[in-house]
Amino acid sequence: MLATMILVMVVLLILAVPVAVAIGLAGLVGTTVYSGLPLIVVPQQAFIALDKFPLAAIPFFILAGNIMAAGGMSARIVDLVDSLLGGTRGGLPMSVIVVCMIFAAVSGSSVATTYAIGAILIPAMVRQNYPIGFAASLQATSAELGVLIPPSIPMILYGVAAAAPVGDLFIAGIGPGLLVATALIVYVGLWSRLTDHGGIAASERKPLFRSFVRASLALLMPAIVLGGIYGGVFTPTEASVIAVAYALLVSVLIYRELSLRGLVDVVRRSAVSSSIIFFIISMAGLFSFVVTRAGIPADIGNWIVGTFDNWFTFLLAVNALLFVIGMFVETSASIVVIAPILAPVAVTYGISPVHFGLVMITNLALGMITPPFGVNLFAACAVAKIGIERMVRHLLPLVAVLVACLMVITYVPWITELPLRLLKAE
């Protein structure tokens, strides 16, 4: 049955059918043809998949990120980081990485980060004579921090799908996010020196103190959101609403850069983005129900346990599998479908569900910058107005850096566990 469902899904994807529709039709085949269940089960399971309180955080974090971009908050963060790093060789591309890391601390979405930050910094890098292919590739890669730096929409999805605490996932994501950001900064610095790009232009930088004052309210937003979550003041879902309220307060009443018409457009775009994610979740929930009802997760778990002798080879095989899946299936759909199957198996090897979740999310995030379905690539191409072929040469080394980081995150668990221990010890 599983083979037939996967075949149906793959054929539909090849025919360019949207991912959510392909997953839903595959689930429909499994429900009616193999399980013999009535059609009423389809909407029931789709609703059950969405009837989870933590999922309410997704549209609010998306809305908060879009308000930041439209209301001038992200532009002020860009100016501040540029005033800090603009006078070093490769400072502007380093700024891209740091800004993406800060913006990711609110938006939770890599695609939103690509559009919001890329629209500002890709043209800026081109003006400083960086190859446009490099600028677009770096933006698409740096935006991956949107799913590693908390709060993160994929972390919320994994927490719901694998019954793992979302708050712990947020805390555990700090280490991997900083690791990836540091590795990218080091690579960019070396690349700039070896290729003689990004000459020092300290005289062109804006005054640091002035930039800091202008960006102070924008910087306060992630501090409020993350500080409240980690301090136990509010839940991640409540934090998403607070993020929207704060972004509106600053953008509309203080900065006054977001008009009523602009707010309507922001809400519309956020609603569309959220609807797409929820449609995927509902159809993936149906798919997971059929698969679980047939006992397939238990069969796969038994096969894995009988095939791989230890946690090391298990994680290596899982990483290889997820890397391939991430190239063809959207990250949210992959998490919702695969996490309930693999997470319990990981526990039998003594792997923490939180650590396994970060490994899974980091791996699938690579799919956002690898063809043929790399959504960050398409977003960066749209912003830079170029084809993917102009990015490949610059993209490959960046992918190699991320793969190296993935291996470190996979086999050095304290990177995810240390922030948890430090914060919970206080």
Image (spheres, grey):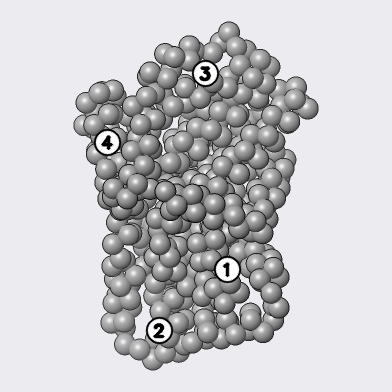
| Residue found at the far front of this picture | 426
Question: Which mark sits nearer the N-terminus, 4 or 3?
Answer: 3
Type of amino acid under label 1: Ile
Left or right of 6 on screen, residue 76:
left
Cβ atoms under marks 2 and 1 closer than 8 Å = no
The residue at 28%/62% (across/down) is 53
Residue at disc 3, secondary structure: helix
Examine the image and state in which quarter residue 132 appears: top right
**Residue at image location 56% in from the left, 86% down from the top:** 299
* Residue drawn where x is 44% and y is 27% of the image: 77
In the picture of the structure, the residue carrying the numbered disc 2 is 31
Mark 1 and mark 4 lie on one chain; the one further toward the N terminus is: 4
Crowding at dot 2, Cα within 10 Å, few <14 / some 14-19 / many 20+, comes out as: many
In the rendered image, which residue does mark 4 sit on?
Answer: 246
The furthest residue to the top: 203
Q: Amino acid at mark 4?
A: Tyr
**Is label 4 in a helix, a strand or a loop?**
helix
Q: Whole-Å distance between the Cαs marked 3 and 2?
A: 57 Å
| Residue at x 52%, y 81% (from the top left corner) | 297
Residue 351 is marked as 1
